[in-house]
Amino acid sequence: MNINLEEKFAAKYHKKADAIYFTPGRVNLIGEHIDYNGGLVMPCAITLGTWLAIAPNNENKFRFKSLNFEMEKTVESNVLNGKDGSYWANYPIGVINEFIEDGKEINGLDFLFYGNIPIGSGLSSSASIEIATAYALNNYFNLGYDKLELVKIAKRVENEFIGLNSGIMDQFAVTFGEKNKAIVLDCETLKYKMVDVDLGNYVLAIINTNKPRELADSKYNERVAECQTALKLLNEEITLHYLCELNAEKFALHSHLITDETILNRATHVVKENDRVHLAAKALNGGNLEEFGRLMYASHESLRTLYEVSGKELDTVVDFCTGYDHVIGARMTGAGFGGCAIALLEKGYEEDFAKHLTDYYVDKIGYPAAIYISEIGNGPIKL
């Protein structure tokens, strides 16, 4: 963090912060658009995230301020009963509301948030804010929730209070993340295992295309429907609950049932991407970063050509990485149609990579991408 949050808190509230917390953002390393098909995702926490300073007040009010947003909010603690438009403070308000509805006694607090996750980039800034609030309140008031309970509370806030029909991966990844480990997670059962990720002489480069993701929601629903169509056709011959119950070999035995080329492409991506998650875990466990990088490239190509959720901006980033000698793997991460790509970049080439990628991207797209260097970090902590 390149700012002094204690000083900023004192300047805004004219008193000292009583506690400071940090919660990371996340990227999904591999396993895209398969969580709703019974597949596995492989997210990790990153070292970009959200810092939160808090102190009690004696006015039975919750005051929300941020160094990222000008708008501020003060709420009486007995009227936490609804969200206010698209206001950023809805995320912490929703968390407090959940705790109070659960019978927890939370007194007045002053909050100051600061985040270095680019908003709307697909790195889970909202989940980071939710878990930052939930973790801080749980710790500060000794409320007794375990990590999974905090994850489920934050997901309820996202789904019911904010009104976004998102899955559980984001909240889970930022809460359960561990340094130099990825999480292989079944989003349906919440069964997971940790996989060692020794990046060695590489870092994680995160490239924000700076393209708004206007199409993501509508295309997401379209892809879900196409996968359900594929599942229905396959069930004429075999019994499946999810496409990811098949591996590529078994899928090949029954794929003749899908005669529509587009539907076949969607199902092929889903089955093979789920296989790639298993292969990626094996590669990482064996310390084979080159193989993991190859799987990243294969994942992006599948998302680009079979699932068609990439786009010119993301493809431009990955195309550059393919021809850059010091990158061994790259792919889009998240829903697609904008947002971010990730790359495994050799240490020592961060500035060179940023300069040459920027020139290439501006030439093709007309405006620059934003490039962040991260390591794989821990979940929430009290500082």
Image (spheres, rainbow, N blue to C red):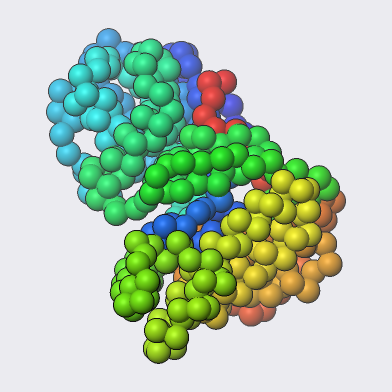
Q: Residue at x 54, y 33 (%)?
A: 379
Q: Is residue 256 above or below residue 7?
A: below
Tell me where residue 333 appears, x and y as whole percent: 55, 60
- Looking at the rendered image, the quarter that the C terminus falls into is top right
126 sits left or right of 346 in the view: left
Q: Is residue 79 above or below residue 326?
A: above
Tell me where residue 321 appears, x and y as whole percent: 73, 68
Tell me where residue 374 appears, x and y as whole percent: 67, 46
Q: Residue at x 24, y 14 (%)?
A: 105
Question: In front here: 101 or 349?
Answer: 101
Q: Residue furthest top?
A: 58
- Looking at the rendered image, the quarter that the N terminus falls into is top right
100 sits left or right of 288 in the view: left
Q: Residue at x 42, y 57 (%)?
A: 38
Question: In front here: 251 or 5?
Answer: 251
Tell me where residue 380 appears, x and y as whole percent: 52, 29
Which quarter of the figure has residue 302?
A: bottom right
64 sits left or right of 192 in the view: left
86 sits left or right of 369 in the view: left
Which quarter of the figure has residue 47?
A: top right
* Residue 212 in view in this figure: no
- So how many labels did they put on this image? 0
Q: Residue at x 59, y 57 (%)?
A: 277
* Residue 278 in view in this figure: yes
Question: In front here: 120 or 201?
Answer: 201
Question: In front here: 220 or 367?
Answer: 220
